[in-house]
Amino acid sequence: MALADIKHRPGLLLGAAVVLHVVIISAQVNTASGLPVLQVVTFGAFAELQRMVTSGVTGVQGLWSGYVDLRGVKDENTALRQELQALQIRLQEERALAQRAEDLRQLLELRQRAELDTTAAEIIAASASPEFRTVTIDKGSTDGLQADMAVISPAGVVGRLILPSRRAAKVQLLIDRNAAAGAIIERSRAQGVAVGFGTGELRMDYVSATADVKAGDLVITSGIDGIYPKGFVIGTVDSVDKGTGTYHEVRVRPAVDFSRLEEVLVVLTPSPARDAAEAADRP
């Protein structure tokens, strides 16, 4: 069967004969250096094969070394990233401690400057309602707190106590829509009432249309309400609409950033107006 296949393929036999003939001739013919051509060709082919194998092995070794190095760099980067995150957290903690120390320092300065009997308190909760603006502090009736005591901060007036319990108390912020405080324009001494909107702003009602009020004027407590001591900062006049009515329409920007409150002072000393009202009620 094999012989029959070979007979039907004369080209194959011819090719084999030619290759054999070339090999025999190459084995007999020498190069200029005296070496047989067949030996030179065979060595060159074998050398190229060795070169390819060596290159392949070297490439694999290089890829493996690169992979190992890359894994090492990746692990190192992960460790460095974790260390950086830990340092960032530590930096935030340090910044928070520094800010708290600064707030407490300002609170102490206010306490000394006010010359009033006060107690420091920390805010532990806040109302979720955007209209009824209240916070809860960590001092209560066991600390001598009573309803309608004024609450202040280094920036200015915060609000008043409305619901003290034994160990905590609720504070109505001045920006609450039901809050109000006797107010006066420091520069011109024009009087009125600072009223909350529930939105973070204040307005000053009942300011006479003839009063001298300008944007940028400082608004302070007048002390006539019997709650807030006189002279504490409420805010700054933001705009004045004089109009043609009996009163100015005055918008006031609060001095206190209520979104950043952490510590406050509760004024334990009754205001002169409150003392006078209590004296008048006594028989």
Image (tube, rainbow, N blue to C red):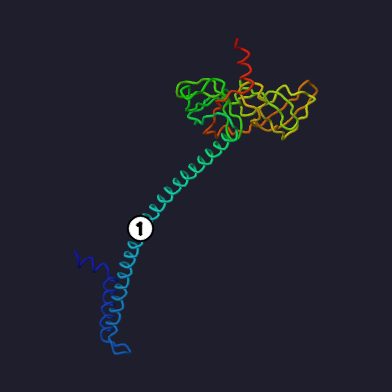
The spot of residue 24 in percent (x, y) is 25, 82
* Count of number-bearing discs: 1
Q: In which quarter of the image is the C terminus?
A: top right
The spot of residue 261 in percent (x, y) is 54, 33
Comparing 71 with 193, the one in front is 193
Comparing 99 with 228, the one in front is 228
Q: Mark 1 points at which residue?
A: 72
The spot of residue 157 in percent (x, y) is 61, 29
Asked whether, in this view, residue 95 is left or right of residue 245, the answer is left
The amino acid beneath tag 1 is: Gly
Residue lying furthest front in this view? Answer: 283
Label 1 secondary element: helix
Asked whether, in this view, residue 206 is left or right of residue 150, the answer is right
* Residue under the point 61% across and 15% down: 279
* Residue under the point 21% across and 66% down: 4
The spot of residue 6 in percent (x, y) is 23, 68
* Residue under the point 46% across and 23% down: 142
Asked whether, in this view, residue 207 is left or right of residue 128, the answer is right
Q: Quadrant of residue 44?
A: bottom left
Q: How crowded is mark 1: few (under 14 residues within 10 Å), some or many (20 or more)?
A: few
Asked whether, in this view, residue 132 is left or right of residue 216, the answer is left
